[in-house]
Structure formats: C-alpha cells, structure tokens
Image (cartoon, rainbow, N blue to C red):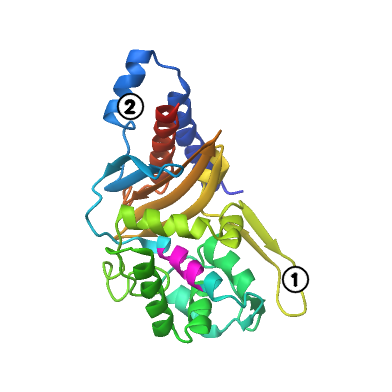
Amino acid sequence: MRLSSRLASLTVACVLAGALGTAALAPSAGAATAVRARGPYRVVARAAELINLASGRRLWSRDLATERPIASITKVMTAIVVIESGHLNRKITVTQAAENYAAEHDAGSAGLRPGDVLTSRQLLEGLLLPSGADAAYLLAYSYGPGWRAFVRKMNATARKLGMTHTHFANFDGLPWPTEYTTYSTPPDLMIMAEAAMKLKLFREIVGQRTHYIAATSAHKAYAWANTNLLLRRYPGTIGIKTGFTLGAGYCLLFEAKRGTHVLLGVVLNSTASNQYSRFTAAARMLNWGFKTLG
C-alpha cells in the first residue's frame, strides 16, 4: 500500500474514531438534555436531515427547503428504476462508449472492460459500490431504452413517490448539462432512500463492504469496494450511497441500526475539499440520534 493511501486510511480512522469516542462518553442527565436540545455537535454540512424510521419523526435537520445538486446519490434512483423493471438476469455487453463516458467525465468507474458481458444484477453492484458511471451508462441505455427515456422513468418514479422538489437531468448525477440541473432536498431524499431500502436486492448490495465477481468466459474478474466508508467505521451501518461533484460537495445518504432503533439520514455538501467530513458528520448525527432515542 502506498504511504499516501496508508495516511488516508489512518486519517479517516482517526477522524471517525474521534466522532465515535466523543459521543461514547456518558454525560450527566442535565448535559444530555442540553445536547438533545441543541442537536448534534459540529455537523459540517450545508443541508442535512435525520429521521427515526420507526415513527417517521424528524429528529434534526438543517436547510430542508433548498434544492441542491446531489451528485451520485442520483444512482439510488437509477437502481430503483432498474430493480423495479425486473429482468435482472438480462445480459448486457460492455461498450467502448460506456468506458469513454466515464473517462471523459473523470467519473467514478467500475472498471468495466469493453466486450465483457455482464447481467443487470452484476452491473447494479458496479453502479452502487464503486459508484460506476460506466455501469450507470449501460443500465440507462438498456432499460430506457436510451438514456433520455430512462431519465423520464426516473422522474416519473420520483413524482409517484411524492418527491416534489427533485429533478433528474441524467442517470448518474454528473454535472451535465450543468452542475445544478439534477437536484433534490433532504426530505425528498429521505423518501427515495426509504423506498430503495425496501427493495431486498438494493439493501443487500449497499450493505456490502466489497463484492467480487469471478472471471468466466464471458467477462474478466471484478473486485469492487464500497465507497461508503461508514460501513467500515460505524457499527450498525446498513447503507446507503455516497456522492461528489464540485457543485454538490461531498454528500452521503446513510442508514444505521442500534438495538431496535433504525435511523436514516443525509448530509449534503459537507465541504468540497475533505471527503471524510461527510462520514464524520453522519457519525455525529447518528450518535446524537441514538442517544436522543435512549
């Protein structure tokens, strides 16, 4: 492992351990009441929300009304449309256009090799774990058919779910035609996340730290790591998706369980310079939320 990678790993471990360790201290009853009253400690995010899934009650929020770019959180809706369309054993050939698309946009990639033949189910793994724009491209063109028809399905699904402050301009959240033509709000993202996590396959995929596909005569081997570092650093995390563009900043849609409580939250634009800040923000929100619920 390169020194820079080791230092990055140590950095995120220390940052998240700090967030977890601070919250693990048991305050006095008076101090706990004060903490609950003011919300989680030092959450760096332009917008955020935390809800108790059992009751649907909002526990804490910040700037719920502003419509903001959501980067690769968009791929949650991409996955919903594909899963609900079915035919997940459909065989899809990786095209040179898909590889070029990810490269030209300097986007997250599943490293798909042109000529390989994968199933839709396998491409969903490549979509959601390494956040592959190449996988998103292939799924959109196959299930539209064509990306424009697919995006229409995404927006129709959003309307059906009641996401009234959301619009998808593309299938992966990349900043085209502009940084701000795909957007949403925290409450709408709670709706989308809840719908996605009710889908068994989606829940299974985003709950994995890694996924490996062995080589066959149809394709090479693939090994993908989940970009959601909260799965490694926060006990009880069960999903769901990261995102980043310069306009959106570092984003995270997350869900975690402790005892009988399940919390769902989102952090939007937790800086555009520190990718670990979103995980620290989420950990602080979760620690506060679980303490609040007792």
Point out which mark residue 215 bears: 1
Mark 1 or 2, nearer chain start: 2
Indicate left or right for 212 with 180 as reference: right
Do the residues bearing badges 1 and 2 touch, measured as CB atoms within 8 Å? Answer: no
- What kind of element bears circle 2? helix
Which percent across, then down, holds residue 180?
26, 67
Can you tell which quarter of the image residue 57 is in? top left
Q: Is residue 249 magenta?
A: no
Specify the segment rendered in magenta.
74-81
**Nearer the observer, 273 or 138:** 138
Indicate left or right for 170 with 127 as reference: left
**Residue drawn at 39 percent across, 83 percent down:** 148
**Nearer the observer, 238 or 59:** 59
Q: 225 above or below 94?
A: above
Q: Amino acid at mark 1?
A: Ala
Indicate left or right for 124 with 216 as reference: left
Q: Amino acid at mark 2?
A: Arg
Which percent across, then down, holds residue 139?
52, 77
**Residue drawn at 26 percent across, 48 percent down:** 46
Which percent across, then down, holds residue 191?
39, 57
Q: Residue furthest front?
A: 55
Looking at the rendered image, the disc whose residue lies closer to the viewer, 1 or 2, is 2
Magenta residues, dominant SS class: helix
